[in-house]
Amino acid sequence: MTEKQEKILNAALKLFAEEGFRSTSTSKVAKAAGVSEGLIFRHFTNKEGLLQAIIQMGEERAKELFSDIVLEPDAKELLRKYIELPLKVKNDKEALEFWKLQFKIKWELELYGEHKMIVIEEALIRAFDQLRYNEPEKEANLLLTLMDGLATRGILQETYELDEATKFIKQKYKV
């Protein structure tokens, strides 16, 4: 990806999150990125193509976040890493801002992207199976749901005690 494409995507992500996808014009994105509107069309075809590129960017970053977790061979360590993921994001200002903007766009457009969670779900099922939980699939689904809510709340609510919630969940799973 070129530097200009990156500038366009970052400007679009920020504007779509702040003003809404439907309310943001490509000309406004171009102005914020310091490029011509034609360059946006050349690289992304249209506003929907720009949105798809932003979503893809989020999926790539999610893969990066998940890679260390899914490759972890030790079941307890895998669970610990997954449970601490929202803290890792919250403590990285650039990552926090990126995910805040991604969440806002997904809420506005009612997009979830559950397919990106399959690899984590499979890793959690394996971990719970190794730890001999009675119903590893249900336990994995419960933890996915719990962490999704925790991440959302931790990212969007500045005063939320994410440290305490994380500590409690780690105690629950003995990791």
Image (cartoon, grey):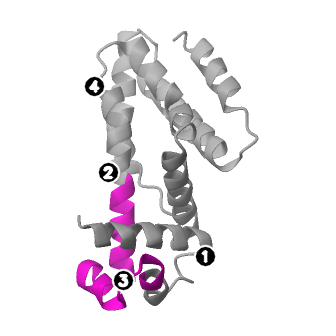
- Image: 130 above or below 42: above
Q: Mark 1 against mark 3, which lies toward the viewer?
A: 3
* SS of the residue under disc 2: helix
* SS of the residue under disc 3: loop
- Image: 151 above or below 129: below
Q: Main secondary structure of the magenta part?
A: helix
Q: Which residue is mark 2?
A: 60
- Image: 144 above or below 174: below
Q: Which residue is mark 4?
A: 71
Label 3: how many residues lie within 10 Å, few (<14), some (14-19) or many (20+)? some
Residue 107 within the segment the image draws in magenta: no
Left/right of residue 136 with respect to residue 19 in the rendered view: left
Label 1: how many residues lie within 10 Å, few (<14), some (14-19) or many (20+)? few
How far separated are the C-alphas under marks 2 and 4? 16 Å
How far separated are the C-alphas under marks 1 and 3? 20 Å
Q: Residue at x 28, y 78 (%)?
A: 44
Callouts 1 and 2 close, C-beta under 8 Å: no
Q: Which residue is mark 1?
A: 19
Left/right of residue 45 with respect to residue 124 in the rendered view: left
Q: Mark 3 against mark 2, which lies toward the viewer?
A: 3
Residue 135: x percent and y percent? 45, 19
